[in-house]
Image (cartoon, rainbow, N blue to C red):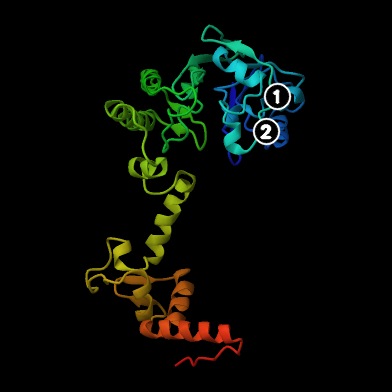
Amino acid sequence: MKVVRLPGIHHDGNVVLVSGSLGHVLINAGTSWYQALQVERITGQLGEQQLDRILLTSRRFPVSGGASHVSAAFGDAPVHIHRDGQAALETGDFFTTWANRYDSDMPRTLTEPLSEDDVFSLGDGEVVPVHLPGHTSDGMGFHIPHLSTLVVGALMPRADRPTRWDMPGGSLVDVVASLKRVKRMNLASIVPLQGPAIRGVDHVNEVLDRHLAFFEEAVSNAGRPPASWTDLRKQLFGSRPAHLGRWKNKKRFRQGREGSRCHSDVAGVAQDTPPPCSGHREKCRPRLVRDESNHFEHGQVHLQGGGLRRARRWKTRARIAQPERRTVTKRLRAVFRQGSETPRFSRG
């Protein structure tokens, strides 16, 4: 059996193509924004073969918006969804599907009911539906037993982003129950709604424990949602936004090579450097100087390589002392208001 994750484009959810000796099944279909591109990506994997059916993890637009188009492109392949989500797709409900949140219409999609009694055999493996309500009442996961892999939808948007229960069809108690059920499955990998797969038993359990701890605390707080979901994500899962998480390691590597702008930015610098400056950022830059080794240093900062370009730019700005910058700005504003020529300032 072959399992291929087609990463989500923009707001699309991850699309997973499961291929076996007896057929091909698509889990989720993305939004309607990139439905034509989605068909091309699937065709590139299938070649001349046909798609047998489409399985949806929920009614939400990021996973179901492109289902109608993809189905029509592959000979009206049947679309399966939990019975609680059938009416929303067949009537094109743009509210409970969240299509209105994306300024989009929800294409009407003919569907067939899906339950845990349905097992999709592909010859050398099978796909087993698992009912996982919480984010929506029709939430489903799809378990691939012999790979110990579970494809979930909005129940787990990303490893570093908790799901929401304060939307139409959501239930906080169901979220906790579904996550506990997922943990009991002892999975080796999870494919979330967006972002990379969560791999490794230890990593999967760590992520599940983190999500469960948050939702159990929310239950103890009478189910009140946070005032800001963005601030909550930063507090629980790190200070960097989820969509920039993949740059975290790159940033650390760059800091290791170049240092940082001032001592308050990074720890572990040389011991013989002076204490950190109190100004930070703007006040650090005017005191930046160049030494004989062709490096730029300021306090505990030592910049090399790509940092040289930044240092030279800071040095240029430093030619105008900080107290004089305000005077220069005022003079420039006065000149522009009068319409006269821009004065020239010496480099001294």
Against 129, residue 311 (above or below) is below
Residue type for callout 2: Ser
**Label 1, on which residue?**
68
Q: Which of 38 and 64 is in front in this view?
A: 64
Real-space CA distance between mark 1 and mark 2, rounded to the nearest whole angstrom: 9 Å
SS of the residue at dot 1? helix
In which image quadrant can residue 221 be found?
A: top left
Q: How crowded is mark 2: few (under 14 residues within 10 Å), some or many (20 or more)?
A: many
Q: Which of 334 and 102 is in front in this view?
A: 334
Against 162, residue 258 (above or below) is below
- Sequence-wise, the earlier of marks 1 and 2 is 2
Estimate the x, y position of residue 309 in percent, counting from the top left.
49, 73
Residue 32: mark in rendering: 2
Q: Which of 268 and 87 is in front in this view?
A: 87
Estimate the x, y position of residue 61 in percent, counting from the top left.
59, 30
Q: Where, quadrant-wise, is the N terminus in this rendering?
A: top right
Residue occupying the point 63% across, 21% down: 89
In which image quadrant can residue 322 be found?
A: bottom left
Residue occupying the point 33% across, 62% down: 265
SS of the residue at dot 2? loop
Q: Which residue extends farthest front?
A: 338
Horizontal arrangement in the rendering, residue 242 relative to residue 268 (left or right)? right
Q: Where, quadrant-wise, is the C terminus in this rendering?
A: bottom left
Look at the numbered discs 1 and 2 and tell me whether their residues touch, using CB distance below 8 Å: yes
Residue type for callout 1: Ser
Q: Is residue 8 visible?
A: no
Against 28, residue 324 (above or below) is below
Residue occupying the point 71% across, 37% down: 37
Residue occupying the point 46% across, 19% down: 133
